[in-house]
Amino acid sequence: MSHSVSSRGAGGGTARPRHRTAAGCTALVVALGAGATACGSDGHPLSADPYDATRDISFSAAVGEGKKTDPDKPLEITAKDSGGRITDVTATDASGRYVAGELSADGRRWHSTSPLAAGARYTVRVSTENKDGAPGRRTVDLETSTPRTKKRLDVVFGPDKGRYGVGQPVTAELSAPVRDKAARAVVERALKVRSTPAVQGAWHWVDDKKLHYRPKEYWPAHATVRASSNLAGIRVAERLWGGTAKPLKLTTGDRMEAVTDAAAHSMTVYRNGEAIRTIPVTTGKPGFDTRNGVKVVLGKEYFVRMRGTSIGIAEGSADSYDLPVYYATRVTWSGEYVHAAPWSAGSQGAANVSHGCTGMSTANAEWFFDTFRAGDIVKVVNSYGDMMDPFGNGFGDWNLTWKNWRKGSALTPDTPNDTPPEDRSRLTPEPA
């Protein structure tokens, strides 16, 4: 549910009251805003408590105890008094989340701009000003109906909670496909990613049921990243309504990067930008060239039995192999690892003889295995191999430019931020 800040004036600005006051009070009234009491002048409209504005406004929805309104329709409030106007509206659900809205320039009409949730209770507070400048107030309860038939869209965030490297994207798996761009925008607005320190980031639709979230650059070292959903009860599409999602909390460690130069047969390991180790390696030989680009550690396996048949090499052919491999750090689902390769010790630092993996001595592989964690960055340059795919074979998300990453979002830079201003300092900034 993408709930947001109330509207306090045209275009979301703060509506200022009309001032029918003595000059000595004007400055104080402007500072306090509508409904303030200033100067204490008996009989002055602004010195009194707000009056009951029930007769001055009308609602497009059924309001009051026992009545229910359609969550598919926007909430609209209109000023009935020809000389009066609405100065402020806040609508919050039972958990305190705001409904975004917009107030017309003349103060005559307010309407919601974010969807209401189904089966939810809201408290709506409306402030008004009559033709004499006196403040009015009305508070009502509103309950939305629940659709008779609906399909629920649940969300599962990934990866599992824990500590990761700075290259780890946040993922969101949906329980049903979402294809329409408008529906995707509803989903994106409701899926929140917060980081401390805050960074610029965006969602990217990998397919109809999966999204990835990454910052413009890598996550900061030692950051805290939280993912949550406000989608519950929100109408996403025809007969599709937002369901449950368990929040996720991740932390990052040091910024660990391994950069392998396939032409130089060498890997340099950096911790927080400082080179800490240089390792002689061998990468893929012609026909089995290691993929270029940025990869992210997917996991670690102390022992793996590697067979040529798993990558399409016929058993008994010149390139066939069946080897016990230790200290294997996986970087693609198709079987590319950084691992111990004692059989190629004579070629490490001198030639590329592997079938695509990055091989090194057992001692170096053990150190790499112990030093790197899931989410850490492994980059290959100067190989004759193809570029790492962005999706489908691990986390190649970082091989897309920020401009191209943004193209995978259903939101545009002009999409309103529906987050209350008091919360924005805690959220990941919207993409620029």
Image (cartoon, helix red, strand yellow):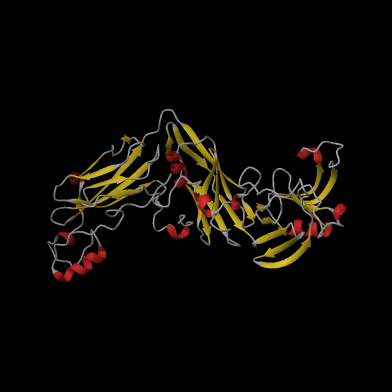
Q: Quadrant of the N terminus?
A: top left
| Quadrant in which residue 342 is drawn | bottom right
Residue 93 vs residue 313, the one in the foreground: 313
Task: State whether residue 135 is above or below residue 408.
Answer: below
| Quadrant in which residue 251 is drawn | bottom right
Numbered marks: total: 0
Is any part of residue 233 visible from this angle?
A: no
Q: Residue at x 44, y 39 (%)?
A: 183
Q: Position of residue 257 (x, y in %)?
A: 67, 60
Residue 113 vs residue 333, the one in the foreground: 333
Residue 360 vs residue 46, the one in the foreground: 360
User: In the shown orientation, is residue 269 left or right of residue 343?
Assistant: left
Task: State whether residue 181 is above or below residue 329.
Answer: above
User: In the shown orientation, is residue 153 left or right of residue 159?
Assistant: left
Q: Position of residue 295 (x, y in %)?
A: 66, 52
Q: Position of residue 130 (x, y in %)?
A: 16, 52
Q: Residue at x 52, y 50 (%)?
A: 404
Residue 123 vs residue 25, the one in the foreground: 25
User: In the shown orientation, is residue 291 left or right of residue 235?
Assistant: right
Q: Residue furthest bottom?
A: 24
Q: Quadrant of the C terminus?
A: bottom left
Q: Position of residue 88 (x, y in %)?
A: 27, 53
Is any part of residue 83 visible from this angle?
A: yes
Q: Residue at x 84, y 56 (%)?
A: 347
